Image (cartoon, rainbow, N blue to C red):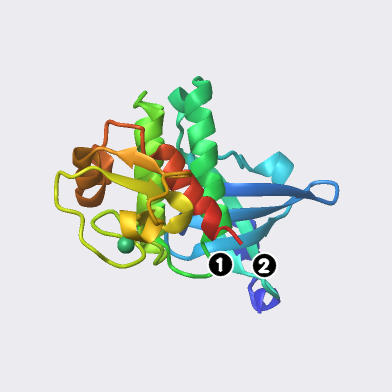
Amino acid sequence: MASSRSSSSSARVAEPDDRAFVLRVSPYGESDAVVKLLTERRGIVSAIGKRAKRRMVLEPFHTLRVSLAKGGGELFSLRAAEVGQARIGLLSRAEALDAAGACTRWTRSLCPEHTEEKVVFSALERALDMLDVGAAVAPLETAFGLVLLESLGFALELDGCARCGRPRPRGKAALLAGRHGGVVCAACRAGSEAGYTEIAGAVLDLAADDPWALRDGGLAPIVAAAVEARTP
Ligand SMILES: [Zn+2]
């Protein structure tokens, strides 16, 4: 397939045809690398980059412009990668780096390969953009985790009991556990509060309506536990 192309096409610089975030880089041989990417058009793909160490910038948290081609088997061929949007502000803040690392790791462990993930791509882009300009990390990590879980069909139940479905009236505080999928009512908990965290009603309402508007980080550990519970 590729060998039928004329030699002039391989001499040209490959034009970027997708945008991507690096999720993992594994060195391969002397100078190549196998890269796991979240791409805007193709979802998660693994690709081999020839002479990647010398030719490409493969760093996480920046938006890359990449050129991908179908490889022989499962792996794509990464023909070019350049930084489209750098996020230098994020790199200088340890807590922002930690949060960006968590969002990237969650994406890598929860999203299946070769499935379109446009919602996750734009959520990751939004989270990284906000981390880059100095936004508080815990609410952002929460917002990204909620969007990720929802887009994969694992939405955290915030408006009612995750077990029996009994509704939570708006404005009413509730006890949640990430590993139990959200709010759990007193009857389903059999009165026990061990392992649950009480979250204010206004925070739960906002998290359900518009998680990116959260300013409170109280849900962060619950969301992290929910992601963990879904991680294969
Ligand atoms: Zn219940």
Which residue matches tag 1? 113
Going 58% across and 49% down the picture, which residue do you hit?
Answer: 23
Along the line of sight, the residue nearer the viewer: 74 or 120: 120
Q: Is residue 104 above or below residue 74?
A: above
Which residue matches tag 2? 75
Give the side of residue 195 with respect to residue 168, left or right. right
Please state the horizontal and vertical placement of residue 133, each as a whole percent of the image. Answer: 35, 25
Q: Residues within 10 Å of mark 2 (few under 14, many from 20)?
A: some
Please state the horizontal and vertical placement of residue 144, each as a whole percent of the image. Answer: 38, 46
**Res 31 label:** none
Quick check: marks 1 and 2 in contact, CB under 8 Å?
Answer: no
Secondary element under disc 2, as helix, strand or loop, is: loop
Is residue 126 visible to us here? no
Going 66% across and 71% down the picture, which residue do you hit?
Answer: 71
Q: How many marks?
A: 2
Mark toward the start of the polypeptide (1 vs 2) = 2
Along the line of sight, the residue nearer the viewer: 91 or 70: 91
Q: Is residue 223 above or below residue 218?
A: below
* Quadrant that contains the C terminus: bottom right
Amino acid type shown at disc 1: Glu
Q: Looking at the image, which residue sits at the far left?
A: 170
Q: CA distance from mark 1 to mark 2?
A: 11 Å
Give the side of residue 19 with respect to residue 199, left or right. right
* Quadrant that contains the N terminus: bottom right
Q: Within 8 Å: ligand 1 and the Cβ of disc 1? A: no
Is residue 134 visible to us here? yes
Amino acid type shown at disc 2: Leu
Please state the horizontal and vertical placement of residue 208, each as a whole percent of the image. Answer: 24, 51
- Ligand 1, by image quadrant, is bottom left
Going 59% across and 52% down the picture, which residue do you hit?
Answer: 80
